[in-house]
């Protein structure tokens, strides 16, 4: 069974990208990904408000998060209207966790805007 592919950032830090450069050529990391963009045109005003709030509070989101964020917006807008049941609340919590929007998961998110003092030692040349 083949090993799982490392994310580009981890491959750079661990040296795997230097050992097997062809394996990681062309991989798009979080820093290179397209931005989250504007809300979907079919979203309600309440959903758009949630989208904009999430985009402002979670700057690490990018284009591959669009569908998950859309689901979060739908559920959070329902919650604001008082129409969210227990099962939907659980789904919303799981989605927020996947997006790194809970206190526990936030520590796992790579923040591209924050400089790590160790970057200069692990940078590939």
Image (tube, rainbow, N blue to C red):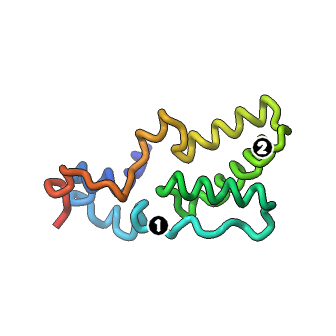
Q: Quadrant of the N terminus?
A: top left
Q: Residue at x 19, y 60 (%)?
A: 123
Earlier sequence position, callout 2 versus callout 1: 1
Q: Nearer the viewer, residue 77 or 63?
A: 77
Residue 62 at x, y = what percent?
A: 53, 62
Determine crowd level at label 2: few under 14, some 14-19, many 20+ residues with C-alpha closer than 10 A. few
**In the image, farthest residue toward the left:** 121
Residue 102 at x, y = what percent?
A: 54, 37
How many marks overall?
2
Q: Residue at x 38, y 53 (%)?
A: 111
Relative to residue 106, is residue 29 depicted above or below? Answer: below
Give left or right: position of 54 versus 116: right
Tell me the SS state at disc 1: loop
Q: Which residue is the site of mark 1?
A: 33
Residue 2 at x, y = what percent?
A: 42, 47
Give left or right: position of 62 versus 2: right
Q: Which residue is the site of mark 2?
A: 80
Tell me the SS state at disc 2: helix
Q: Quadrant of the C terminus?
A: bottom left
**In the image, farthest residue toward the top:** 86
Determine crowd level at label 1: few under 14, some 14-19, many 20+ residues with C-alpha closer than 10 A. few
State which mark lies toward you, 2 or 1.
2
Q: Residue at x 39, y 50 (%)?
A: 110
Give left or right: position of 28 versus 10: right
Q: Residue at x 85, y 39 (%)?
A: 83
Alpha-carbon span between mark 2 and mark 1: 31 Å
Residues marked 2 and 1 touching at CB (< 8 Å): no
Q: Nearer the viewer, residue 80 or 14?
A: 80
Residue 31 at x, y = what percent?
A: 39, 63
């Amino acid at each position: 069974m083949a090993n799982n592919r490392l994310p580009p950032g981890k491959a750079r830090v661990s040296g795997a990208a230097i050992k097997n450069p062809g394996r990681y050529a062309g991989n798009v990391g979080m820093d290179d990904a397209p931005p989250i963009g504007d809300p979907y045109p079919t979203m309600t005003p309440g959903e758009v408000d949630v989208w904009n709030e999430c985009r402002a509070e979670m700057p690490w989101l990018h284009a591959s998060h669009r569908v998950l964020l859309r689901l979060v917006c739908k559920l959070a807008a329902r919650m604001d209207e008082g129409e969210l049941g227990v099962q939907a609340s659980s789904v919303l919590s799981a989605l927020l966790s996947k997006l790194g929007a809970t206190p526990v998961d936030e520590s796992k998110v790579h923040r591209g805007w924050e400089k790590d003092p160790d970057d200069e030692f692990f940078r590939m040349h």
